């Protein structure tokens, strides 16, 4: 997938820690059949989708949306979950450099 995507970040600017997959953040967790997905990152193709989730999920409150443009070199993506949700398996060293807060 090439194009703009959105991701929730914790601070005013994207940091490397905002782009750590669940599998790295919680290595002892059992993800079962979802282990492959846990190695990727959630991104959204629509700004409204990420804003809705930031408001809806208590654990996401206080976060803000960031926007980045992915190219084929950035890694693989797969449509997972909702129509506008993608899992992105990052293939670049500093993904935070592609994103800026919106």
Image (cartoon, rainbow, N blue to C red):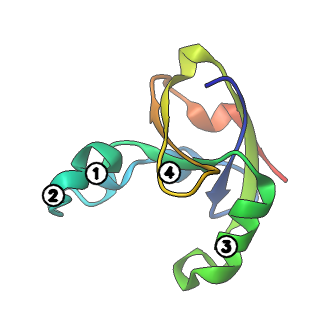
- Residue 2 lies, in percent from the top left, at 67, 23
Mark 3 / mark 4, whichever is N-terminal: 4
Q: At numbered mark 1, what does the secondary structure look like: helix, strand or loop?
A: helix
**Residue shown at 67% from the left, 48% from the top:** 14
The residue tagged 1 is 23
Q: In which quarter of the image is residue 16?
A: top right
Front position in the image: 19 or 40: 40
Front position in the image: 63 or 52: 52
**Residue shown at 72% from the left, 72% from the top:** 52
Q: Is residue 66 left or right of residue 78?
A: right
Name the outermost residue toward the front. Answer: 83
**Residue shown at 70% from the left, 80% from the top:** 55
Q: Distance between the residues labelled 3 and 4?
A: 18 Å
The residue tagged 4 is 17
Labelled disc at residue 32 = 2
The residue tagged 3 is 54
Q: At numbered mark 2, what does the secondary structure look like: helix, strand or loop?
A: helix
Q: In this view, does 10 lie to the left or right of 79?
A: right
Q: Distance between the residues labelled 2 and 3?
A: 26 Å
Determine contact: label 4, label 2, CB under 8 Å.
no
Mark 3 / mark 1, whichever is N-terminal: 1
């Amino acid at each position: 997938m090439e194009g703009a995507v959105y991701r929730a970040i914790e601070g005013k600017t994207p940091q490397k820690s905002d782009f750590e997959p669940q599998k790295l953040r919680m290595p002892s967790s059992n993800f079962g059949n979802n282990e492959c997905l846990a190695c990727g990152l959630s991104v959204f193709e629509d700004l409204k989708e990420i804003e809705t989730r930031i408001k809806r999920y208590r654990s996401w409150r206080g976060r803000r949306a960031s926007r980045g443009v992915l190219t084929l070199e950035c890694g693989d993506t797969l449509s997972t979950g909702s129509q506008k949700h993608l899992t992105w398996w990052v293939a670049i060293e500093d993904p935070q450099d592609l994103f800026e807060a919106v």
